[in-house]
Image (cartoon, rainbow, N blue to C red):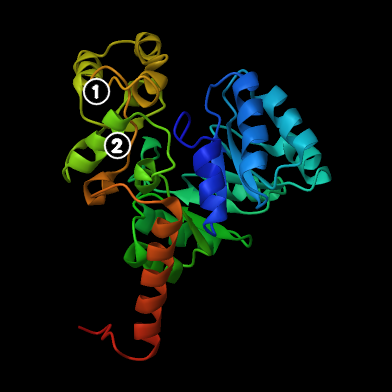
Amino acid sequence: MAWVSTAELAAAVSEGGGLGIIGSGQAPPEWLMEQVLKAKELTDKPFGVNVMLLSPHAENILRFLAEEKVSVVTTGAGNPGKYVNMLHDAGIKVIPVVSSVALAKRLERSGVDALIAEGMESGGHVGELTTMALVPQIVDAVTIPVIAAGGIYDGRSMAAVLMLGAQGVQMGTRFMCAAECTVHNRVKEMVIKSKDRDTVVTGRNTGHPVRVLKNKLARKFMELEEICTPGEELEKLGVGRLRLAMVEGDVEMGSVMAGQVSAMVSGIQPAGLIIRDVISGAEKIITDIYNGKVNLQQ
């Protein structure tokens, strides 16, 4: 959600009853510092920051977040173990994203507070397992709370992962079309117009596969991968492409990272309304099951 989940969206999600997360990605520290301070102006509710540990700025960013005492740090693309004590000393919860049981077990031993089990349905960087398969396996393998991510759009999908043992959900794609999301309108239009088979995974040759909406850039990636282009060349092709799409609005040669639920997004809604819709939908389904209104044996 780098260049997507900015201070405006994170603050709106927190104001709406969720936990807003600012996506830092590969952005320079100065940009992230501005975003954190802006979010503090927009909300007095807790919010967090996602840090990609592969970023050359990761250590500086994490030290800044410790100084600012944000509520939560979520991490991806690496092991946050060496930063856990520093963040805990600042009162910050540490919640890494994981895509396998082995990684989940290793990160639990490092002292993190919870895990985000992210299935391959999600947008952006993905693993190999689906949310339906991954979540219960990680729930069974660890003792800390598990948050489910990937393919979650509404109350039905939230209720489903809660029944798999998750204690919460992380959502991204639907919030790309939140009214408070600052991505370019062409990106929102592309998500809304997308169909069920309009996402594709590129970059497998680099070791960092990414789910995106199909466009000229995605087709170029797939053509190059078909002829076994070296991963380094593919990495160069991808540099700056996310910002090109999300900020500048180039939805043909930019990287429009979005999940498989894109086709379910039908319009632009305030973040608070999205949250209420998901929560009320999940509550109704769970209540109906509890009261015997849903026959699970059919």
Instruction: Mark 1: give few (<14), some (14-19) or many (20+) Cα within 10 Å.
Output: many
- Residue 201 in sight in this render: no
Q: Determine the residue positioned at 71% across, 45% down.
A: 110
Reply above or below: 222 against 42.
above
Per the rendering, the mark at residue 188 is 2
What amino acid type should be assigned to the residue bearing mark 2? Answer: Lys
Residue 153 sits in which quadrant? bottom left
What amino acid type should be assigned to the residue bearing mark 1? Answer: Ala
- Considering depth in this image, is 24 or 44 the residue closer to the camera? 44
Q: Position of residue 229 (x, y in %)?
A: 28, 11
Reply above or below: 111 against 248.
below
Instruction: Mark 2: give few (<14), some (14-19) or many (20+) Cα within 10 Å.
Output: many
Contact, mark 1 vs mark 2 (Cβ under 8 Å): no
Q: Position of residue 164 (x, y in %)?
A: 43, 67
Q: Kindly report the distance in space between the C-alpha atoms of the residues bearing marks 1 and 2.
A: 18 Å
- Considering depth in this image, is 182 or 190 the residue closer to the camera? 182
Residue 178 sits in which quadrant? top left
| Quarter containing the N terminus | top left
Residue assigned mark 1: 218
Q: Residue furthest right?
A: 89
> 191 left or right of 280?
left
- Considering depth in this image, is 283 or 200 the residue closer to the camera? 283
Q: Residue furthest front?
A: 41
Task: Tell me the element at label 1.
Answer: helix
Reply above or below: 147 against 64.
below
Per the rendering, the mark at residue 47 is none
Q: Position of residue 112 (x, y in %)?
A: 68, 49
Q: Determine the residue positioned at 76% across, 36% down.
A: 68
